[in-house]
Amino acid sequence: MTPLTSAQFHILLTLVEGRRHGYGIMQEIEGRTGGAVVLGPGTLYRSIKQLLGRGLIVEVGSGADGSPEDGNQRRSYAVTPEGKACTAEEAQRLQALVQWAENAMVLEGGR
Amino acid sequence: MNGLWGGLGRAMLRVFPRDFRERFGEDIANHFGTGSREARARRGPLGVVHFWIKSMVDVVRVAAAERREERRMRTAKADGSAFSDLGQDVRYALRTLRRTPGFTVVALVTLALGIGATTAMFSVLNTAMGRSLPYPDPGRLVFGRATFSGNVNPWVAFPDYQDYRDQAASLESLATIGGGTSLVTITGADEPEQARITFVTGNIFATLGVHPQLGSTFTIDELPAAGGGEVVISHSFWQSWFGGSPEVLGRSLIVDGAPMTVMGVMPAGFRFLYDVELWVPPWPGNSDPVTRRYHNWLLVGRLGPDVALDAARSEIDVISTQLEEAYPESNQNKALQLDGLHAGLVEGFQQSLFLLVGAIILVLLIACGNVASLLMARGSTRTSEMAVRSALGAGRTRLTRQLLVECVVLALMAGGMGVILAVWLQDLILGFVSMDSLGIGEVGLSPTMLGIALALSLGTVLLFGIFPSLAATGTNPAEDLKEGSRGSTSGRGIRYRSGLVVFQVALSLVLLVGSGLLLRSFARLRGVDPGFQVENLLTATVSLPADGYSERDQRIQFFEILREGIQGLPGVESVGFVSRLPMLQTAGNVAIWAIDNPPETIANAPLADSRIVLPGYFETMGIPLVGGRDFEESDVGGSPPVIVLNRATAQALFPEESPLGRQVAVDVGEEEPALLQVVGMVEDHKLSSLAGGTRTAMFFPYAQQPTTTLRLAVRTIVDPSTLVRPIQERIWELDRDIVLSDTQTMADALATSVASTRSVTTVLGMFATVALALAALGLYGVLAFFVTQRMHEIGIRVALGASGGNLIRLVITRGMILVGVGAVLGIIGAIGATRLVENMLFQTSATDLATYVGVTGFFLVVALGACLLPAWRALRVDPVEAFRAE
């Protein structure tokens, strides 16, 4: 399986917690990373397109989570079971990397 | 409300590929709107600028990546889409063809005829050249013919055959078969029946590799001292005479009065050279003497395993040289030519077939020219359609492809119809060019033939499709849209079509000249005076059975009585009997010389065609006696031997002197020549073919050489065919077991003798007529189109007072220039091409001026006719109408 890009992983993480529309995804990522990660509109929608293409997320009706932004019809996205599994797998891979970093005492040095 | 920013964002979307834009455009625009408002709310106008710069950079980067990806996807999918385009083209082509039924039917029929005829011709040729003979391992079979000083004779002498057979180690076996067939009467049942018989050596079946279905072959000596005694019968004769009885072997068959034992039955369908029912061993006295000077046999042999034909030829040549040394009297300059059996058999009609194939290809080319011309005419009416499609974004390749697909569809449909036609045409061709000797009765449908048809169909597409397609699409859309209303095209179309007409005129003229030459040659052949009167002459064969007619006197008496009997029949003018009729049966050439001028060896003596006649024969035939007397009742066995010579023989033997009363010697195949006195001289007449030159001939009185078979010639004053029955009844009054056979009129016989020449002439004439018609049609089409196209100009001319004569001259000049150029090219082509028929021509040169002039003149008349109709239309152009059409 093609590895997830960083943007895709962020989007998936966001959607695992609940469905959101495009702009909402961006906001959530920005908030959760303290503004460190801000997805531009091109990157955001290209990643969404790719995730849709791989069947990791699906499009759902607008505002189904009860949070319509400003009455506009917006498409929301939700993660599929495959998407969830893929997110978990990627998280595990990253966790292993973090573990490695810990063992290498990279994190201690930084403390 | 996303307002200004949303609008700007939407403008940004242009950079994305269309798919992406359609899918996410709205979201991205919203994104820009929402993002801008939030940025301003948080950080003021600078925040907005910051947001926009960051977003723009991102959008451009992503858009570039998306476009790259899309391009990759498109090329990967390209193959699939080409196929769907092709399907679209095919559907479109079918629709277009349906929309113009007139064009489609004419094009289809023209092409189907062309493809069908060519396929049939090729298929026949292919079968003739490629079909292996219906014998096992046919590649090893060889055909042996004698040559004299290098010229094929083709008959071989029996003793020579025996020497070749015994000495040639390279041949596994060598057999011989008689030079012809004869009819015999089978008696023993209620009604006598006739059967066709030929002489063979018993090893012929094994040599060919076909063994009797029942029994075996002859057991007696290959050259029995007396009449046969053993016979191998055909499957059909076994069925008809013996009812297919399995107990046929050993049964007796009375053949011409002689009992013969059935030794074997050949499998159904077996034939070699002739369609015969009976095969019997040769025996001396059946007709010609068995000596090295009588050539009456054809050889068929089988090469030893792994022996090359050339090796066998070398060995045969060595044997020929040895025979020449051993028997200089008979074998000087004599050799044996060995060929593959198939090649030897095909030789006879190979030239005719190649000629016809060449001709039909020309016809096909001309037909293709017409269809191309039609396509161009149609293309010009479709210029607007093409221009519209081109303006809508169809590339030139796309348009060309679509037109080619139309042509392919047309050609394949025509090819399919052509195959059906071809199956039928093949039989027709076989009717004209018989190939029975190859065992080819019918050709049928074969994969080869389908392949040929497909190849031809596609080949014709290239011929008629490419140029019109290029011409039709090579136009300027803007110009054509503008001119479209007038339905005209650039000068290119008419130039192509004019070129096509020139080419058609040239090709059809080649065909016309070729068939004209053959026709003229044929007319000359038919016009040849055979030297005897052909009309009202009935011919037939009377064969005496061996028992009851073994004595000379019995035979002489029988024919004397029969002659008187027939003479007495109402409607009979006179009756003649001869051993071999001129034109119908060939006779052996025998050495003859004047006694006071003997040759050094017999091989150097002059040869003369030898026939035996009853008194009254010359008179009946209408062969003038130029000196001396005819044979008389007094020329009998005991009286001095006499002979009648034709003028050519007399002049050869006694130049500048009268032959009458002189003594001549004739080689009769024995130690000593026979000595005879010349009592008469007759005018020269044709002996074996109309095309042959004057030949030396001599005639013996029947009473001094009474053979068992004579041919009857009856001069009648009524329709000859009405006398067949009365003559047969006269014979039956003498003997119930004798059948009158081979009855035909001399006129029919002569027609048959030139039948193969006539077949080729007829078929080629048909092709030439079709070619002429097609070329005239093509010419008419182009001129009609020319007139339509110039309607406007003609209208102006009429308005300005041009006379009818002027208009007609305009059109005819145009047409005649095309015809003139084509004719010049055609004549040049014909001079080259007619070399191929040169050796088929009789007293006619391949560059016969009269034929060239006549054919060209005829062509010009037809072409003028084709010009007149469009010219007449030009005359009727009403200037007002012509302008209104603008």
Image: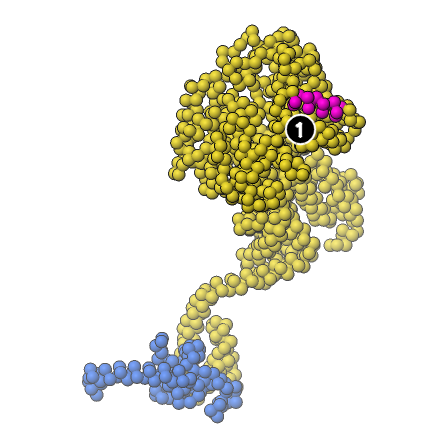
Chain colours: A blue, B yellow
- Residue B390 lies, with reference to residue B795, above or below; the image says below
Q: Which residues are magenta?
A: B554-567
Q: Is residue B557 magenta?
A: yes
Q: Is residue B813 magenta?
A: no
x%, y% of residue B413?
61, 54
In what quadrant of the picture does the C terminus of chain B appear? bottom right
Residue pictured at 65% horizontal, 9% vertical: B660
Decide which of B780, B21 is in the foreground and name it. Answer: B780
Q: How many marks?
A: 1
Disc 1 is placed on an element classified as strand
Q: Chain of mark 1?
A: B
Residue pictured at 56% horizontal, 62% vertical: B87
x%, y% of residue B785?
69, 47
Q: Mark 1 packing: few (<14 Cα in 10 Å), some, or many (20+)?
A: many
Decide which of B845, B666 is in the foreground and name it. Answer: B666
Residue pictured at 61% horizontal, 14% vertical: B649
**Quarter assignment of residue B274:** top right
